[in-house]
Amino acid sequence: MNRQQKIAAAVAATSAAALIAACGGGGSSAEAPALVTQSAFELQMEASRLNLGADPSMQHWRSFYCNLSDDNNAIVIAQRARNSIRMPLTQILDDVWYIGTEYVGQYILKNSQGLVKIDAGNNADEMRNYNLPAMRTLGLGPGVPLNGVLVTHGHADHDGGAVELKTSTGAPIYLGSADAAGKAYAPTTLDSSVMTPFDISVGGRTITVLSTPGHTVGAFGFIVRAQDDGKEVKLFVSGGSSLVAENVPLIQSYLNSMERTYDLLKKMKVDTASNPHTYWDGSRNLIQQIQAEGRKKPSQFIIGNDRLLRAMAIGRTCTAAWLAKKDPTAVMPVWRVSSLDFMPASPSAAQLSARVTNGWGPVSSQTVSFTTAAGAALCTARTDKDGVATCQPASALKVGTDRVIARFDGASTVSTVDLGSESTALVEDPAVSGCRDLAAARSASGSRQGDALYSPRLDINADGVINLRDLEAITKALPAGTACKA
């Protein structure tokens, strides 16, 4: 039996075991339920839903990344009609602006050396009438040059204005080498065959680029160091969104690109992402919030690395489902997104306790490590049947000063990949933090996963609802003699 056959057998066995357990398991052969296994497609689709977690905004990512596997490509087609609806130049970060339509747009970066642009517009008329005037309002001219244009991929709605832009400004236009053939604007090529990330310097900016074939063979993603309220943040601009419908090798490339992108975003702790098709990942909603409310601190555009990684994992799972449907012989482990939450009354100076869960329930028999924010090791513990790891810190911690990081590094089998997660919290007096958690649980009592008041860390038994059992568990975790105000 080769490796793929072993993995396929393990996936089938896992599916069958899960079904038997759900039906009660055990019993005589006459009483046992008929053995029905989930296909690889069904397993991946189930994972795409279970990985949503408690964040309602993740459904938006899933709807678009799963549009083909959901047989709902109509939601993507409908967005094309919005290409005629202009969106004004909008500042989304200290040094980043969006300009475009409600269907597709571009990003303009500005620093002391001038401008850098990501994508080159739909066509020459758009470039003349909207994009160039928008850049002039940001100072484009002899003292503020356009130092370069980064094109995510070679489709016309992303480089249709490139000739006009290059003619007007003389700026070099960067494009993946695999998409460069026949382009009239003579692009400066990025090597599409290099699958590892590398840095380029454009206009005094260091930009990390990653070849992401799949949407096109020459697609690239870009990680931009930007500023938000004077602090450095990292923005990832995706190199292509829609899966191809039938080309299995390109779907396989897209899956590989998603996995490499996830790894890079995690390693670099990227804060947020956007797609030139801003409807795809909800960026359009964030831009419209900024237009309506003004830019806040932090910007509404900053979604955080945890949410970004969850979203990308959902995208990867939707891609795996589509590949499984188009190629039933393809074998891919199921990615499972985990959450790591400190338990009520933790972290304290005397005890550290955190729980690992995913959409399938508590994650047991896995190692959680606790360190200070400075990296000093405190202790490690294995999660119990409820997914909880508890240990005592090896060194003294200062209440109100020290911060503790709990980290689950993840785990893999032939059929599943449990993705790692981490959480950071301030060391507090357990009576104070425990009473605060109890008050929050009382306020959220009756709320369910997906509701605004629901919080995973208050759902002690991880059953998807905050109820009396959770209140009782939080009360038991309080130090002896603690009296919380009702």
Image (cartoon, rainbow, N blue to C red):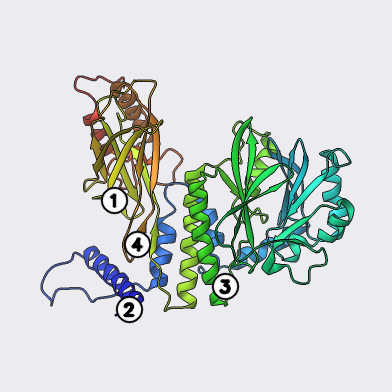
Is residue 23 placed above or below 483 in the rendered structure? below
Disc 4, SS? strand
Three-letter amino acid code of the residue under disc 4:
Thr
Residue 313 left/right relative to 226: left
Three-letter amino acid code of the residue under disc 1:
Val
Residue 12 left/right relative to 256: left
Q: Disc 1 vs disc 2: Cβ atoms closer than 8 Å? A: no
Q: Quadrant of the N terminus?
A: bottom left
Q: CA distance from mark 2 to mark 3?
A: 24 Å
Q: Residue at x 22, y 68 (%)?
A: 20
Crowding at mark 1 (Cα within 10 Å: few <14, some 14-19, many 20+): many
Q: Sequence order check: which comes first, mark 1 or mark 4?
A: 1
Crowding at mark 3 (Cα within 10 Å: few <14, some 14-19, many 20+): some
Q: Sequence order check: which comes first, mark 4 or mark 3?
A: 3
Question: Which residue in the structure is indicated by mark 3?
Answer: 250
Q: CA distance from mark 4 to mark 3?
A: 23 Å
Which of pointers 2 and 4 indicates the residue nearer the eye?
A: 2
Crowding at mark 4 (Cα within 10 Å: few <14, some 14-19, many 20+): some
Residue 270 left/right relative to 339: right
Q: Disc 1 vs disc 4: Cβ atoms closer than 8 Å? A: no
Three-letter amino acid code of the residue under disc 2:
Asn
Q: Disc 4 vs disc 3: Cβ atoms closer than 8 Å? A: no
Residue 2 is marked as: 2
Q: Disc 2 vs disc 3: Cβ atoms closer than 8 Å? A: no
Q: CA distance from mark 3 to mark 1?
A: 34 Å
Q: CA distance from mark 1 to mark 4?
A: 13 Å
Disc 3, SS? helix
Residue 363 is marked as: 1
